[in-house]
Structure formats: structure tokens, C-alpha cells
Image (cartoon, grey):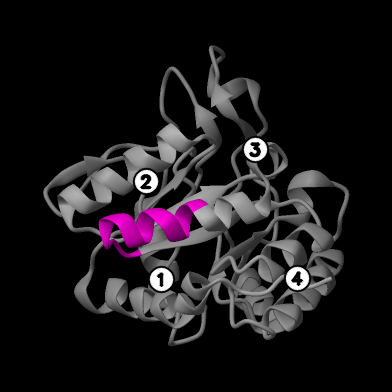
Amino acid sequence: MTMALSPRSRSIEGARDLMGRTRTHRFAVGAFNAGDIETFRAIAEASDALSAPVLIEASASEVSFMGLRLLRSLVDTYADEFDIEVYLNLDHAPSIEAAKAGIDAGFELIHIDLSGSDHSLSTDDIIRGTKEVVQYATSTGALVESEDHWFSGSSTLHPEAISTHSQPAKTDPEQASRFVKATGIDTFAVAIGNLHGAYPTPPRTGFRASESLAGGALCQPQSPWWQWDHRDSGPDRSVGGHQQDQYQL
């Protein structure tokens, strides 16, 4: 049964507008995972203090713990209490069914990551599944993000060196362009040598490669941002006068 959309979920047009503003005005949007009420409030207070828009993300484990309805309600509540611009992203949805549930719950953004949960999937498998989610998302207008290959590592603190992992993936521009055109996604998870998790020594990431990919305008004109998971490893960047280590490009 499809859940009724909350009033705040109708801000999907606002999320699309925010994407356009990031490109036009060249600024970043922080995306932070929240698995408890204290973290939700801290994110909301920071957004209010800095007068900055923000994304709140919920992974599969956070959805399992808190539930889609509560996550939606918390974002709506803090958006109203602090009068902030905040949107809800389903982070690395492991299946088509999970992505559809997020869409039904009124999430503005959906990240479908089929290969993250099943490394054996072919590119064609990922394309077929992603297209199904994109089509389903037309029921609410939710924005869909995907990736054509799983990222190495895991979202935790790693004591071991990066060399113990397989070579970090790097996005091939031509393959990425074909993937975006085949699926119709709004945003593409670009790989520039980044890994999930935090390591003793950060990976060597190719920011020039990301600039080249962004310049290629892989995604639709109305949604030109790139999301880099806040849990991925990478060097600090100064955005709007504040230091943060993950960003929307």
C-alpha cells in the first residue's frame, strides 16, 4: 500500500531547484547520515546556524532501526521548527523494493545501489533495476541517483591501510555517459578513487577527473549536482568558509 505523502515531501521541486543553484552559484551541500534523534537535531541546528541547506540521509540499517515514517516525520518536524531547507535522501538502497518504499514514504532523493549489495550484478542488470526505480519515481517526482559499479570499502573506521583493499574504482566518462542516458537518472555517483570508510591515510582522489566529468554534463540539465557520500574518505575542502570533507560538486 502506497503511503500518503507528507506536506514536506511536496518540496521535491525545491530539491531540484537546489541542485540548479549549486551549479549556478558553485557551492556545496552537506549530506549527513542520521540514525537517532540527537543527530537529527544537531544537523538541524547546524543548518540553522549557518543558514545553509542540508541533506539528511538514511541508510538501510538506519531505515531498519527508525522506520521510513519516523524518518520522514523527523525531517518535516525539524524543517518546520528551525525553518530550514532540508531534504531526505535514501542512502544506498540495496534493492528495488527498498527504493520504492522510500519513494512511497516521500523521500525527495533516492540512491539506488544494486551492485553494493550484490557485486555479481552486470552493468545490464544494474541498468534494468535502476530504470525500474526511475520509472516508479515519476509517481512523486523524487530524484534518483545511481552508480554503475560498487565502491570498495565499508562505512566504518578502518585501522588497515587502503592497499589491503582492491584498487579503488574510477569512473570512465564514456561508460558513465551511456549509463546516465540508458537509465534516465538525475544524479550519478562518481568514483574518483574514493573509498567508503575512514582510513589512517586518505586515498589519492582525482578531483580534476571529477571536474572533467561534471563539465561533460552527464546528468539532466535541471539536476546537475554530484553527491559524494559524507562517509567516503577524502581530503578536506573549504566550502562557504567552513571546512568539510565531503561535498556536492
Q: Residue 214's mark? A: 1
Say which amino acid is labelled 4: Thr
Task: Tell me the element at label 1.
Answer: helix
Q: Quadrant of the C terminus?
A: bottom left
Q: Which residue is mark 2?
A: 246
Horizontal side of 129 relative to 28 (left or right) equals right
Between disc 1 and disc 4, the foreground one is: 4
Q: Residue 130's mark? A: 4
Task: Tell me the element at label 2.
Answer: loop
Say which amino acid is labelled 2: Gln
Q: Is residue 150 visible?
A: yes
Task: Tell me the element at label 3.
Answer: loop
Residue 83 shown in magenta: yes
Q: CA distance from mark 3 to mark 2?
A: 17 Å
Q: CA distance from mark 1 to mark 4?
A: 21 Å
Q: Magenta stretch: give its range.
A: 74-85
Between disc 3 and disc 4, the foreground one is: 4
Q: Which residue is mark 3?
A: 152
